Structure formats: structure tokens, C-alpha cells
Amino acid sequence: MRVLVQRSNKASVEVSNKTIGKIDSGLVVLVGFTEGDTIDNIKYIVNKIINLRIFPDENDVMNKSILDYGGDILSISQFTLYAETKKGNRPSYIKALRGEESSKLYDLFNEELRKYIHVETGEFGADMIVNITNVGPTTISIEK
């Protein structure tokens, strides 16, 4: 399981010219799954995300988690996080978990996040337009 976490002050996702998810402040989480991912992997990653201290405290030091600071999460499934380019310029996605299994894990991931915080989502498998205003910029990669 691989995620990219971006601190954002505004983000949205569109499918077919319709906004289906948006947040004003919080985190954008791009998530991809691979063979062997389990609910334990999901719980580990969710714990990392909600406790990641990348929001400013009263001294403007990144010392607060999203739970301390406030905000929401925009969760986007993104199989391209498992792209490999070792054999040329056309990426291979062979390590990305396919369709139905990945969709189930994505749903479980969002359910687990929702135990702690409000979550907006994209649409699994759809061609999406994701708008992110990355603050900092702050982008953290987490893998399990």
C-alpha cells in the first residue's frame, strides 16, 4: 500500500464535469494498493495519516496532526502510484492491484479513515480531475 499525503487549503475532484468531493482545509490522500495488502496495512497507514504532524502550531512549526488542527480528508484512489519506468518511457502498472480487489480495499480504507475524520472521495476507476492547492508545499509519502 502506498499513499501520498498533501497538506491542502482547498481541493476538489470532478467526474464528468461534476464536483463529487471537495474540502476547504485538510489533507489530500492519494492511495494505491498492491498484491498482499490487508486490513492491517490499512490500519497502519490510517494511523500514520491521522497522526502525521504536518500542520502549524502557534509558533508556526509543523507540530500538529489533522486531528489537532482540524480539517477534512479528500481521498483519491490512484493506481499510478505503483508505476514503474525501469524498462523505458512507458510506465508499467504490473504491481498495482487490479479492479475489484483494489476497490474493496479503497472502500475499507475510507471506512477506517471515517472513524476519525470527515472524508470526501473521488470515484474509484473513474477518469477524474483533481484540483489541489498544496500548502507548504507539503507532500509526504507513506508505504506499508
Image: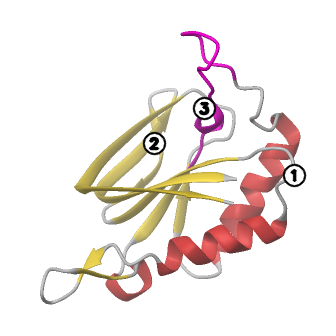
Coloring basis for residues: secondary structure
Left or right of 137? Residue 78 is right
Name the chief secondary structure element in magenta: loop
Q: Residues within 10 Å of mark 3 (few under 14, many from 20)?
A: some
- Position of 21 relative to 96 (above/below): below
Left or right of 137? Residue 64 is right
- At 52% from the left and 71% from the top, the residue drawn is 49
Q: Nearer the viewer, mark 3 or mark 1?
A: 1
The residues colored magenta run 76-92
* Residues tagged 1 and 2 counted as in contact (Cβ below 8 A): no
Q: Tag 1, which secondary structure? A: loop
Q: Which residue is mark 2?
A: 13
Q: Tag 2, which secondary structure? A: strand
- At 44% from the left and 28% from the top, the residue drawn is 17
- Give the image location of residue 84, x and y in percent: 63, 26
- Position of 36 relative to 113 (above/below): above
Q: Disc 2 or 3, which lies upstream in sequence?
A: 2
Q: Which residue is mark 1?
A: 36
For badge 3, the amino acid type reads Thr
Q: Nearer the viewer, mark 2 or mark 3?
A: 3
For badge 1, the amino acid type reads Gly
Instruction: Quarter of the image for the C terminus: give it.
Output: bottom right
